[in-house]
Image (tube, rainbow, N blue to C red):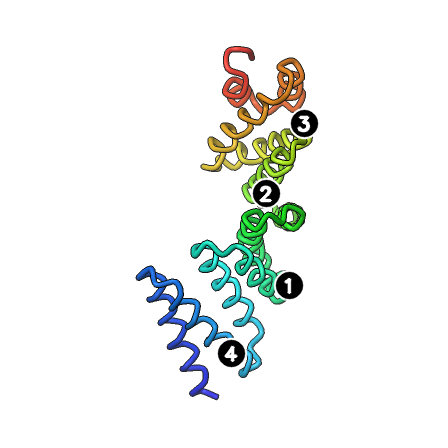
Amino acid sequence: METERQKLLDLYHQALDARRAGNLPAAVTHLRGCLALAKQLGDGLSRGRLCALLGDIQLEAGAPAEALTCFELAAQVLTGTELRRERLMMLFRLGQAARDARNETRAIEAYDEIIRLAQGSADIRAEGLARALRGELVCERGSYREGLEQMLLGMQRLRTAKAPELDAVISRAAHYGSHLPRKEYERMIKDLAVGRDIRHRLLGDTV
């Protein structure tokens, strides 16, 4: 048993070295070897974490469908209160893989779960970012008012958290807002009370 665990550890470090060297196919091969050993050992938690790492590498390799499959496998294992933060971070990557794979429904499901988890742990930055990403996806579907409402709620959370992602979200929201009639866009921003500083950036000189 100890021999298999040492093999797993050796393969894991080889995978990390290959990733750092930019040799993603080799990293994938090593991680698949790790997964086989983790299965042999009956180590479910390690399998979940290895699947999440493999998903990250598949995203880097431009294979979002394969990455999504890996993250879905990880999501089956990374559960429980003690793994809430780890699951939350993995779900952000799952959402990105789903978007890149054109599976918008799964991406929205991931963002909805992040919002629930973040509210349960009072993680306002994660909640804000998930709302902003969800809203952006809805805007991309052509539902600009519904999407912007989510993005504006996300901005409120990100502003409170002093999150570095806020600037990028404001820029994207202003872009999507240009698809609405100006008066409707102005009224929406003022009604949601996102803060004078954000209103100014979203509306320009009209505050």
Q: Secondary structure at mark 4?
A: helix
Marks 4, 1: nearer the viewer: 4
Give residue 43's position: percent from left, percent from top.
Answer: 55, 77
Residue found 53% across the figure and 25% down from its top: 175
Residue found 57% across the figure and 60% down from its top: 71
Mark 3 and mark 1 lie on one chain; the one further toward the N terminus is 1
Quadrant in the picture for residue 156: top right
User: Does residue 117 sit above or below 204 in this rendering?
Assistant: below
Give residue 190's position: percent from left, percent from top.
Answer: 63, 18
Give residue 21's position: percent from left, percent from top.
Answer: 30, 62
Q: Which residue position holds label 1?
A: 80
Q: Which residue position holds label 2?
A: 130
Q: Which residue position holds label 3?
A: 145
Give the distance between the C-alpha atoms of the residues marked 4 and 2, in whole angstroms.
33 Å
Mark 4 and mark 2 lie on one chain; the one further toward the N terminus is 4
Mark 4 and mark 3 lie on one chain; the one further toward the N terminus is 4
- Tag 2: residue type? Ala
User: Does residue 183 sit above or below 173 in this rendering?
Assistant: above
Residue neighbourhood size for the residue with mark 4, other residues' Cα within 10 Å, grouped as few (<14), some (14–19), many (≥20) = few
Give the distance between the C-alpha atoms of the residues marked 2 and 3, in whole angstroms.
17 Å
Q: Are marks 2 and 3 in contact (CB under 8 Å)?
A: no
Q: Which residue position holds label 4?
A: 36
Give residue 16's position: percent from left, percent from top.
Answer: 37, 66
Marks 2, 1: nearer the viewer: 2
